[in-house]
Image (cartoon, grey):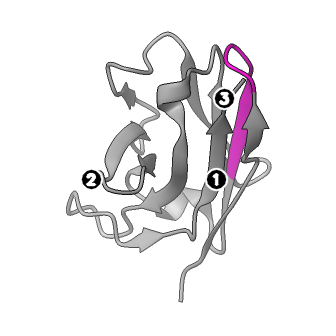
Amino acid sequence: QVQLVESGGGSVEPGGSLRLTCVPSINIDDFFDMGWFRQVPGKEREEVATIDSTGTTSYAESVKGRFTLSKDNAKNSLNLQMNSLKVEDNGSYYCAADEFGDGHMDHWGKGTLVTISS
């Protein structure tokens, strides 16, 4: 059973930064797409950022210019650097991975909570 373990969530003031890390239980290069999603209670889960096997990234409009998604093959990790955080970035952030290349995220982490408040 593939596992994705997230870390790095926490509480910061608006304008602050956080770095989320996702470490899979298998080689990160075994996945096609990977990404971060977030969810706020009462709302649908939304895609924040994704990266494909070529390293091409895609971002939600709301985070472009503030968030940076990257893979660290040496550490076998997927990282989301979040800068200039806003209250609307609040939520539980989930790492996900597509193992079979069908455009469907097959594996999900348990999530890490991000709280932005003054």
Q: Secondary structure at mark 1?
A: strand
Q: Residue furthest front?
A: 118
Image check: 3 left or right of 48?
Answer: right
Cβ atoms at labels 2 and 1 below 8 Å apart: no
Q: Is residue 31 visible?
A: yes
Residue placed at 69% from the left, 43% from the top? 20
Which labelled disc corresponds to residue 81?
3
User: Are there few (<14), some (14-19), or many (20+) residues within 10 Å of tag 1?
Assistant: some
Please tell me whether mark 3 or mark 2 is closer to you in this view.
Answer: 2
Separation of disc 3 and disc 2 at Cα?
Answer: 23 Å
Above or below — where is 31 with respect to 37? below
Residue 14 locus on image (x, y percent): 67, 18
Cβ atoms at labels 3 and 2 below 8 Å apart: no
Q: Which residue is mark 1?
A: 113
Q: Which residues are magenta?
A: 13-21
- Quadrant assignment, res 79: top right
Please tell me whether mark 1 or mark 3 is closer to you in this view.
Answer: 1
Image check: 16 left or right of 80?
Answer: right
Which of marks 3 and 1 precedes in the sequence? 3
User: Are there few (<14), some (14-19), or many (20+) residues within 10 Å of tag 2?
Assistant: few
Residue 30 locus on image (x, y percent): 50, 64
Number of disc labels: 3
Q: Which residue is mark 2?
A: 44
Which of these two is toward me, 110 or 89? 89
Residue type, mark 3 in image: Gln
Q: Secondary structure at mark 3?
A: strand
Which of marks 1 and 2 precedes in the sequence? 2
